[in-house]
Amino acid sequence: MSTARILVVDDDPQIRRILRITLVSKGYEVTDARSGEEALLKLEEAKFDLVLLDINMPGQGGLATCRQIRRDPDIAIIMLTVRSAERDKVEALDAGADDYVTKPFSVSELLARVRAALRRVPLAPEAGPQVIKLDDLEINLAKRRVTMGDTEVRLTPKEYDLLHYLITHPDLPIPHARLLQAVWGPDYGNEVEYLRTFVNQLRKKIEKNPSKPRYLLTEPWVGYRFHLPEPSAQ
């Protein structure tokens, strides 16, 4: 059973009711909203761990709402969409979502996605280096904190978990499926567009030249590798 707080945002009252019953039965604390505007108001009033957000709503749409919610990097976001094209899914991830579920979906699929979105990669073991410095970039694994010079780099939970896994397996080509299962969980493995989108977002935040990355490298037909130059840690 979980005590995570979830905000369900959908203009369809039947979907809100079904989601509420399903999630409450698993121990989640659930609040709902009928629109993006109402959701933003509720997020100002209370703290939530996860937002289930419909992409197609009257008024302010789901993508615009997602971008506003993503200003808080600590909230997990799952988009609910009837669209199945990869372009639409990538658009949702680009807006800041951690995941998406295509309607109609099964209860088991939804719960698996919720668990994955709330899942966090454990902190680095104390035996390993806790602070990694790469020129102006500093990654503090113990504090889950990334800085570029004097500025904190605000990563979403999944962005940080992806970076954490790569940097604690330096200079090793990590296959797509292994990365997906390490960061999102064992139900994942084929969602390569997830990684492509999240890696692109990470590069924009930690690379001086994202189009010519120095650290977060692509391994063609395999996956990704974090290049850790020497000296690598303190």
Image (spheres, rainbow, N blue to C red):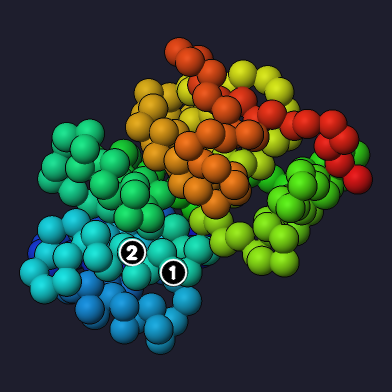
Q: Quadrant of residue 52?
A: bottom left
Q: What residue sits 31% from the left and 63% below the top? A: 66
Q: Quadrant of residue 35?
A: bottom left
Instruction: Examine the rendering and report whether any part of residue 79 can be seen.
Output: yes
Of all residues, the one furthest to the top in this rendering is: 221
- Amino acid at pointer 2: Arg
Residue 119 image offset from top left, x and y in percent: 54, 48
Q: Quadrant of residue 213?
A: top right
Q: Which residue is mark 1?
A: 71
Residue 45 image offset from top left, x and y in percent: 40, 86
Relative to 108, say whether 31 is above or below: below
Relative to 84, say whether 177 is above or below: above
- Amino acid at pointer 1: Arg
Q: What residue sits 44% from the left and 34% below the top? A: 195
Left or right of 116, for residue 113: left
Q: Quadrant of the C terminus?
A: top right
Look at the numbered discs 1 and 2 and tell me whether their residues touch, using CB distance below 8 Å: yes
Find the distance from the CA under tag 1 to the CA under tag 2: 7 Å
Mark 2 secondary-structure assignment: helix
Instruction: Examine the rendering and report whether any part of residue 105 can be seen.
Output: no
Left or right of 37, for residue 126: right
Residue 158 image offset from top left, x and y in percent: 52, 48
Q: How many marks?
A: 2
Q: Which residue is mark 2?
A: 67
Q: What residue sits 27% from the left and 68% below the top? A: 65
Q: Residues within 10 Å of mark 2 (few under 14, many from 20)?
A: some
Q: What residue sits 34% from the left and 47% below the top? A: 93
Left or right of 80, for residue 193: right
Q: Residues within 10 Å of mark 1 (few under 14, many from 20)?
A: few
Left or right of 148, for residue 132: right
Given residues 225 and 43, the one toward you in this image is 225
